[in-house]
Image: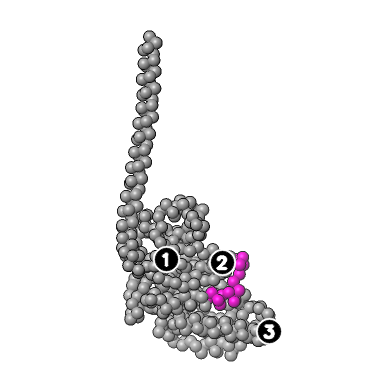
Amino acid sequence: MNISIDVVKYVGISTSFGSIILLLILWRVFKVTKKIIVKKSREKFFKRNGGLLLQQKLSSGEVNMNKVKLFSLKELEKATDNFNTNRVLGKGGQATVYKGMLIDGTIIAVKKFKVQGKIEEFINEFVILSQINHRNVVKLLGSCLETKIPLLVYEFIPNGNLFEYLHLRNGDMPLTWNMRLRIAIEVAGALFYLHSAASQPIYHKDIKSTNILLDEKYRAKVADFGTSRMISIDVTHLTTVVQGTFGYLDPEFFQTSQFTEKSDVYSFGVVLVELLTGQKPITLLSQEEAKSLASYFIMCVEKNCVFDIIDERVMKEGEKCYIMKVINLASRCLELNGKRRPTMREITLELEAIRKLENESNAQEGKDEFVRSEDYKSWNDNSINSEIMSTIDQSRRTTILNDIHIVTM
């Protein structure tokens, strides 16, 4: 009897251990299988996202391996806490940007696209950005191709974008006249580099204040090259589907579908007016109607009341003759005829000359940084307004004046 009980216990224990061992084996098989599936999936995404083509370009020297690298998904998941929503820096129509930190302590920004695009375009963008080397252009650190949609990894820029400081911060960190002028010079210099100094001309195609980031010292960094294109040196324009941001879009590009370097100049002109006025590029008057800052600015110039819309801080801190020169430059950037607009080289040199003259004037006269507001009693005198008006051909502005109020689409 006792022998039978012992046998039963032995059989029961053996069965239990067997079940446990079987479960462990099944669990192990599941983990290994899952790991293999994930690995194969990542390899498939890597190939589909142009990984082999990109590796070829890396090995051929088209992309400098010292500047960019291919990150693994595991690295970026760890850096961003599995793309935690608390790490979101910003969201756009095409992508979400996450803040992360690599193992070596480097702070990064990871751009996760929402819509899968053409692989050739992604590789082209990666190659373009890897070749840009300018202190006022956001640096690309690398990419990850192991996901359904490729990820881009950039240097982290801590102080947000220019749009926030001009329109949303409510005086939290107001931009001084000197800061605004410096930012304008830095952005102009970056665009001059892209248009003229890079190995091949690059059109940014989406210059706007939200794409101008500010670093720890509030230096400008041009970002978001998702729609940028590199063209041959002997090509004067790029025929493409009209795309851009409402309020910054070149009217000539809208009419002809031909994007030129002067289209970037127009968009920069809108940013320059934002810096001067502190107003948004588009003001919604109703659900169906909006006011264009560019059109409103030109109208005010032509009606001799442009100083009424200049930001109060700019009026207090700047000298009237130099602010007038920037107004004049912005008006030329917003010419309807692209051929009449200055180049980014001319804009950069002119802005630098304005800052140099203003600094020399302040040093010579021994003035404080902030000029007394009573010095501006005669800002609207006829001599100043006539000088501004002399730079504008009234016939070329008729179209803008007839379109001060535009309908949103």
Pick out the residue farthest to the top: 1
* First reached walking from the N terminus: tag 1 or tag 3: 1
Q: Is residue 56 magenta-colored?
A: no
- Numbered disc 3: secondary structure: loop
State whether residue 269 is above or below residue 124.
Answer: below
- Which amino acid type is shown beneath numbered disc 3? Gly
Residue 113 in sight in this render:
no
The region drawn magenta spans 170-184
The residue that label 1 is drawn on is 66
Quarter of the picture containing the N terminus is top left
Query: What separation in Å lies between label 1 and label 3 (alpha carbons)?
Result: 48 Å
Residue at mark 2 to residue at mark 3: CA–CA distance: 30 Å
Q: Can you give x and y, in whole percent of width and height, for residue 137 in the image?
A: 47, 70
> Across the whole image, how many numbered discs are drawn on residues?
3
Q: Can you identify the residue that label 3 sits on?
A: 366
Crowding near the residue tagged with mark 3, few <14, some 14–19, many ≥20 C-alpha atoms within 10 Å: few
Q: Would you place residue 33 above or below residue 314 in this image?
A: above
Estimate the x, y position of residue 151 in percent, counting from the top left: 40, 59
| 293 versus 38 height, above or below | below
Q: Residue at x 35, y 75 (%)?
A: 231
Q: Secondary structure at mark 1?
A: loop
Disc nearest the viewer among 1 and 3 = 1
Q: CA distance from mark 1 to mark 2?
A: 25 Å
Q: Is residue 183 magenta?
A: yes
Task: Say whether residue 331 is left or right of residue 39.
Answer: right
